[in-house]
Image: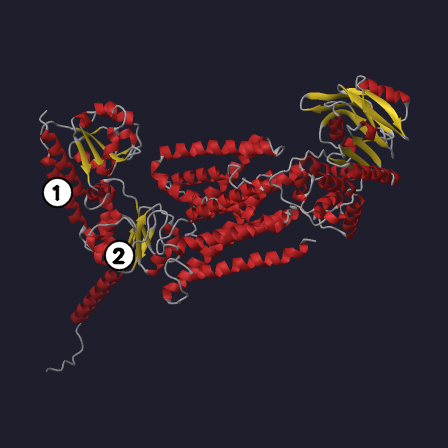
Amino acid sequence: MNTHDLSVYRGPCAILRELNLHIPQKQWTSIVGPNGAGKSSLLQAMVGLLHYTGSINLDGVDLKSLSNKDRAKTIGWLEQNTNTHQEFEDCLTVYDTVMLGRLPHQTWLHLPTQEDHLKVEQALKQTHSWELRGRLLNQLSGGERQRVLMARLLAVDADILLMDEPLANLDPPHQADWLKQQKNLLAQGKTLVTVLHEIHFALRADHIIMLHHGGMHFQGSSQDPQTHQALIELFEGRIRLEKAGNDWVALPN
Amino acid sequence: MKKNTQPLTQAQYVWVGVVLFLLFFSLGVLASPITVVDDGGNTLNLNNPPQRVISLLPSLTESVCALGKCNTLVGTDRYSNWPKSIDSLPKLGAIGDFNIERIVQLKPDLVLLEKASPLISRLKSLGIPTLGFDIKSMEDEHRALQKLDLVFDTTQGNRVWDQIQAQIVRANKQLPTSPKNISVYFEVNPAPFAAGRSSFIGELLNRLDLMNIIPDSLGPFPKINPEFVVKAKPQVILISETNISQIKKRPGWSTIPAISQNKICTFTPQENDILVRPGPRMGEAALIISECIQKKMSSSEQ
Amino acid sequence: MTSKHFLPKFILLLAISAILLALGSFLGSAGISWNLSDASQTIVFDIRLPRSLGAFLAGALLGLAGGIAQSLFRNPLADPYLLGSASGALLGVGIMLCFTQIGSPLLETVGINGGAFIGALLGVFAALLLAGGYRSSIRLLLSGVVISVILGAANSLFTFIRPDLYQSLQSFMLGNTTLLTWNAVELMAITLTICLIITLLISPALDALALGENTALTLGLPLAQLRLTLIGVLALATGCAVAQTGLIAFVGLAAPHLVRKLSAGRQRSQLLFSGIAGGILLLGSDLLARTLFAPIEIPVGIVTAVLGGIYLLTLLKRSQMGAHS
């Protein structure tokens, strides 16, 4: 997926200006940057929630030319789990919540098919939430809720998955599960794009894009020393990178 | 006994014919239905004068009784309270909550009510005849009495009207000849709503040669600005006794001659009923007003 | 999974409705009986039955509209009148009352009921215009409030100019089930059917709103069109109910809350049950209104307001205790 001169607007203000990004297919790209750099806005523009100028191309096809439904089937988006428990939630069960992910594939009558039920079950099992399926959404803890929302994303069965802070509220064991899940998804041939502020997780990705001041600071492979250098610059020398085993870790300086 | 077996002569044929014709003619007249057009433009057709009447407006109840047909009433609205004989009749509610079931249960052959009431179409769909009235001026009541005369086949309407007129004339005579054109203000309720010149109350005041401070342009029952009364400085204020305490508290009202000289005519609830109903007791209303004004004006020699 | 439980709940609600309807033909201010003497037959068939059925249907329309309002705006305080339909209907009635004195036959057929209906629709339309279509629920809510206030002021001005019409307007505002005819029942039945069919078809898409507006959009839903359609249904249902029974308070607000636990968050069930609950609520209130102080009838709007008030109080109490635990 490529963007060409992409400028994303929130209202009249340009959050991001003239970005030319490359997101390799079937790999995991991670977007990092300081707070307010526009990472979430970039994802939102990709799913058509924010107005933008320039173009976003998928295999040469401009995203704007896709119908709403087609785009929904191709790109899935996981919103930031801001953990504000709405007092008033028409409390759906976990199962029904994940079933919502099948909406792009359903007819206008929205009656669940055999395949829908299969995909929902798969998604719940992948995120270790199958036992939660009868519970109401607003009765879950933060971590449980995060896994259920992830399952909802998986149920869409899209080729490209955009995730905004997917590790929020997850404790280390579940973070490890999530990593495993990412590897599985890659093996299935999905393209993953995540916005993370946990740098060491970002470094586990194949590809890193750094955003700063509304523009791109650097983009490159996560193993490349140039990328590491750019990362340290991005955070103004306040971090240092060390190798721990096979992986790189970012520590405060 | 003479047996008359002679055939009838031509003259006798004619006589029989005439008698028969007169007979049928009078039968026809007697059998012709009562036809009245009410104030809402609807035509009422009855074969006979009604025997079971429901009146849903106090002034109509009083009018029916004044015409001597009180005994036909089988039900009234909640506020009808005169004459005393109707007290025992079932009370069927008031505007907004009329009790349809009870009305139907009473099996009326005529219902008298306000011409704009939504009850009219409902009763029509249930097959109950109605007569709608819109009585705002004295002439409206005169017409109502005449219509009721037609409906009940009575002739009392004009007599009642004449009696009202006589009472008004008597009331006028009661008032002192000077000062002339005493200025008055009649308050109907504390909103404040006043009685304008074109209302039946205003007409009474006019017949008593009283100067109503409310001008014609404001209509029959306008809601006015209290300031207006202060500016107009009426000599007498006419008001129900339940509202008297709060009008003295109104800002600026202490400067009104009627208040500073305590020329306030207050009416008991019974008197108030007579005053605000455009019915057969309007003559009495005139007498109540003139008695009070005469008392107030004479108590303080200006 | 939960569809297993749907049928018994549905049947239960319908059963309650049927019982109330039977009671409706039985109870009345003229006495409690089916004693079929001459006049009583008229009372039962021409007065009580259409009145009971009418009350149920009007309540169902209001309940459905209230459910739609609360689901569309994700707000527990939303009711069918929030887009200006109430003030619009009131103004429509006032204008019609003025004109009935002219005696034009066209206006006679439109009548007060027609005036209320058109007024309600125009009120919602004005709110939509002011908000510039349905792009944001906040914007629409706000413009609904603005229109209600503006039309409310127009109504006050109106009663000032024509104080003689004040009482008629007052009785319309309080709501009235006593004058319901078989005609009215027919009209409301047709409207309810149309509204229910449309709602039930498109409501599953509303389920996605539970995840937030943004996520719902990314699932490919034509949210703007869906919302416009639902607002149309809301206006139609509210207008029809208000035209026949006046402005009855609380039914639209309380009905969706009563069935929320039953529907497990699915909008199809929630909206259908809201409708039935609304019918039960209004019919129940009507039964109380006619029998509590028989033969005096309390305006049904007072009963619904008292019941609704009590219910909201218990709701508050419960959430307070929830907050402490």
In this rendered view, identify the residue nearer to me: A189 or B68: A189
- Name the chain under label 2: B
Q: Residue at x 70, y 35 (%)?
A: A81
- Name the chain under label 1: B
Graded by Cα atoms within 10 Å as few (under 14), some (14 to 19) or many (20 or more), the crowding at tag 1 reads: few
Residue type at mark 2: give it: Leu
In percent of width and height, residue C208 lies at: 68, 42
In the image: residue B196, left or right of residue A242: left
Residue type at mark 1: give it: Ala
**Is disc 1 placed on a helix, strand or loop?**
helix
**Is disc 2 placed on a helix, strand or loop?**
loop
Instruction: Answer with the quarter of the image where residue B256 lies.
Output: top left
Residue pointed to by mark 1: B166
Instruction: Answer with the quarter of the image where residue C229 lies.
Output: top right
Residue pointed to by mark 2: B89
In percent of width and height, residue A127 lies at: 78, 43
Graded by Cα atoms within 10 Å as few (under 14), some (14 to 19) or many (20 or more), the crowding at tag 2 reads: some
In the image: residue A14, left or right of residue A207: left
In this rendered view, identify the residue nearer to me: A124 or B204: A124
Answer with mark 2 or mark 1, whichever residue precedes in sequence: 2
Location of the C terminus of chain C by quadrant is top right
Q: How many marks on residues?
A: 2
In the image: residue A49, left or right of residue A21: left
Residue B191 visible? The answer is yes
Residue A221 visible? The answer is no
Q: CA distance from mark 2 to mark 1?
A: 31 Å
Label number found at residue C159: none
